[in-house]
Amino acid sequence: MKVSYDSKADAMYIYLSPKKKRVTKTEEMSSGWIADYSGKELVGIEILDAAKVLGSKLKMEEKDSFQPSIAHRIK
């Protein structure tokens, strides 16, 4: 798993597949949470307004990629 964060867009992307796969379907799960699929496989999740939504649960850093420090599971 790889996580990237864009501080200008305040968007986080969680790559669930170790290999880059072509996204064939994008679906909004809830407001600001977007799922990307390659066929039936979930390959990534985008979180908009990430600092506002997850800021207290993650140690946010302004880097292209970082490992999150999550205190509990995100549902």
Image: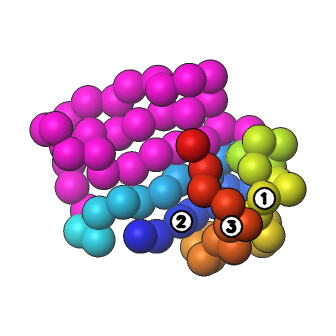
Which is nearer the N-term, disc 1 or disc 3? 1
The prevailing secondary structure element of the residues shown in magenta is: strand
Q: Which residue appears at 65% of the width and 71% of the height?
A: 68
Counting from the top left corner in percent of width and height, residue 31 is at 62, 22
Up/down of 74 relative to 69, above or below: above
Instruction: Locate the N terminus and report the quarter of the image it occupies.
Output: bottom left
The answer for how far apart the CA atoms under marks 1 and 3 are is 6 Å
Q: Secondary structure at mark 3?
A: loop
Which is nearer the N-term, disc 3 or disc 2? 2
Taking the image as shown, residue 31 lies to the left or right of residue 19, namely right
| Contact check, label 3 and label 2, Cβ < 8 Å | no
The answer for how far apart the CA atoms under marks 2 and 1 are is 14 Å
Q: Is residue 7 visible?
A: yes
Q: Which mark is residue 3?
A: 2
Q: What kind of residue is marked 1?
A: Lys
Whether the magenta-drawn stretch holds residue 28 is answered as yes
Which is nearer the N-term, disc 2 or disc 1? 2
Taking the image as shown, residue 57 lies to the left or right of residue 64, namely right
What is the span of residues highlighted in magenta in the rendered image? 20-49
Taking the image as shown, residue 70 lies to the left or right of residue 23, namely right
Within-10-Å neighbours for mark 1: few <14, some 14–19, many 20+:
some
Q: Residue furthest front?
A: 72
Taking the image as shown, residue 21 lies to the left or right of residue 49, namely left
Task: Say which quarter of the image contains residue 42.
Answer: top left
Q: Nearer the viewer, mark 2 or mark 1?
A: 1
Residue that label 3 marks: 70
The answer for how far apart the CA atoms under marks 3 and 2 are is 12 Å
Residue that label 1 marks: 57
